C-alpha cells in the first residue's frame, strides 16, 4: 500500500512508493508543460471542427472550411491540365508529320512523349527504347522497322497496335509454324535456319536450305531475304534479331512462329498523347524521315519481328 509522507528536506509530499529506500517526490507538473498540454487539446478540438477529421462510413467529416488534401490535389491537377490544354490542343490539331516544322511544338511534343513513354512503353522497350537483345521487343533506336519508321508510320502502329485483338486495323502478319504444323521436317527446319544465318554472314551457305527458303519463305522475306514491309516481314540479312540470332533460336522461330503483341493505344491514350509518343519514338535515332518512306507505305497487318 502507498505510504505517503512529507519529505522533511523539501517539504513536498512523496508519491507513497519506495524502491530500495528511494522515494519519489510528488512534484507538481511544470507550468509551461500544463499550459502546452491544454493548448494542444484546444488545437485538436479546433482542427476537428475546421478540417476533415472524424471517420465516417464512407468518408471523414468535411469540416467547416471544406478543405482536404484530395481536394487540393484535384485543384492543382485541374490547374496543370488547364495550363497544358493549349499545347495539347495544338498537337492534336496538327498532323503528326508537320509537328517537326514548328520547333516549339516539336520540343513540347518530345517532352510529353518522353513522359508518356516512361509510363506506357518502357516496361517492354526499356527506358531508353533499346530493349534487350533476344527478348522479342524491338529496339526503337536502330533503323530496322518492320512497318516503317517515319513518324506517320509510327503513329499508325501506335494507334492500331500489332496483333492487337481490340483493333480491326491492327498490323497483322503470320509466319507459319513450319515444324510444329508439319510443313517441314526437323532436318529441313535445320537447313532453312542454316541458310537464314548465312544471309547475314553468320554461317556457311546451305544449298538444301536455300532451296527450301525459295519454296517457302521468299513470298514474304523476298528472294534476297531483305524482307517486304507490306507483309511486316523482317530483313534477314542484317544482324537485328528480336528473338536471338543463334542457330538454336532461329530453329525455334522457324519450328514455331513467334507472334508478339503490342496493344493498340487508341481508346487508351488521347490523340495528342499518341502523336507525342510517335514524335518521341521517331526522335530516338532510328526513325526514317517522312519523305523517305513515302514511296514504300506499309500495309495493315502486324509485325513483331521474327528471324
Image (spheres, rainbow, N blue to C red):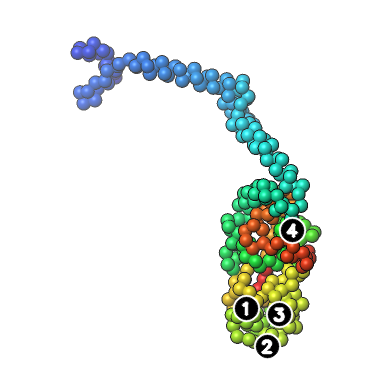
Q: Position of residue 23 (x, y in %)?
A: 24, 21
Figure quadrant of the C terminus? bottom right
Q: CA distance from mark 1 to mark 2?
A: 17 Å
Figure quadrant of the N terminus? top left
Mark 3: few, some, or many residues within 10 Å (few <14, many ≥20)? few
Label 4: which secondary element: helix
Q: Image check: 219 left or right of 80?
A: right
Most foreground residue, 236 or 87? 87
Q: CA distance from mark 1 to mark 4?
A: 29 Å
Query: Which numbered circle lies on residue 274?
Result: none
Mark 2: few, some, or many residues within 10 Å (few <14, many ≥20)? some
Q: Which residue is label 4 attached to?
A: 152
Q: Are marks 1 and 2 in contact (CB under 8 Å)?
A: no
Q: Is residue 27 above or below residue 145?
A: above
Q: Which residue is label 2 attached to?
A: 208
Label 2: which secondary element: helix
Q: Are marks 3 and 2 in contact (CB under 8 Å)?
A: no
Mark 1: few, some, or many residues within 10 Å (few <14, many ≥20)? some
Q: Which residue is label 3 attached to?
A: 224
Q: Position of residue 32 (x, y in %)?
A: 37, 16
Q: Is residue 49 above or below residue 70?
A: above
Sequence-wise, the earlier of marks 4 and 3 is 4
Closer mark to the observer between disc 1 and disc 4: 4
Amino acid at each position: 500500500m502507498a505510504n505517503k509522507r512529507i519529505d522533511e528536506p523539501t517539504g513536498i509530499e512523496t508519491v507513497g512508493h519506495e524502491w530500495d529506500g528511494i522515494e519519489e517526490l510528488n512534484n507538481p507538473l511544470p507550468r509551461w508543460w500544463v499550459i502546452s498540454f491544454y493548448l494542444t487539446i484546444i488545437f485538436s478540438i479546433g482542427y476537428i471542427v475546421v478540417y476533415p477529421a472524424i471517420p465516417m462510413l464512407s468518408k471523414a467529416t468535411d469540416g467547416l472550411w471544406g478543405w482536404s488534401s484530395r481536394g487540393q490535389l484535384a485543384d492543382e491537377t485541374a490547374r496543370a491540365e488547364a495550363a497544358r490544354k493549349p499545347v495539347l490542343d495544338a498537337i492534336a490539331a496538327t498532323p503528326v508529320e508537320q509537328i517537326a516544322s514548328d520547333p516549339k511544338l516539336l520540343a513540347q511534343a518530345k517532352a510529353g512523349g518522353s513522359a508518356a513513354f516512361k509510363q506506357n512503353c518502357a516496361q517492354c522497350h526499356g527506358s531508353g527504347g533499346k530493349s534487350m537483345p533476344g527478348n522479342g521487343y524491338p529496339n526503337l533506336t536502330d533503323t530496322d522497322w518492320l512497318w516503317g519508321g517515319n513518324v506517320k508510320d509510327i503513329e499508325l502502329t501506335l494507334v492500331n497496335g500489332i496483333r492487337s485483338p481490340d483493333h480491326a486495323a491492327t498490323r497483322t502478319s503470320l509466319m507459319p509454324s513450319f515444324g510444329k504444323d508439319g510443313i517441314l521436317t526437323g532436318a529441313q527446319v535445320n537447313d532453312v535456319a542454316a541458310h537464314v544465318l548465312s544471309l547475314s554472314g553468320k554461317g556457311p551457305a546451305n544449298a538444301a536450305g536455300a532451296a527450301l527458303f525459295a519454296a517457302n519463305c521468299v513470298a514474304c522475306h523476298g528472294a534476297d531475304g531483305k524482307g517486304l514491309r507490306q507483309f511486316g516481314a523482317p530483313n534477314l540479312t542484317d544482324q537485328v534479331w528480336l528473338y536471338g540470332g543463334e542457330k538454336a533460336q532461329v530453329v525455334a522461330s522457324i519450328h514455331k512462329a513467334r507472334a508478339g503483341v503490342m496493344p493498340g493505344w487508341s481508346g487508351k491514350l488521347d490523340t495528342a498523347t499518341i502523336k507525342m509518343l510517335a514524335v518521341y519514338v521517331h526522335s530516338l535515332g532510328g526513325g526514317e524521315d517522312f519523305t523517305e518512306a513515302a514511296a514504300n507505305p506499309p500495309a495493315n497487318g502486324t509485325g513483331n519481328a521474327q528471324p
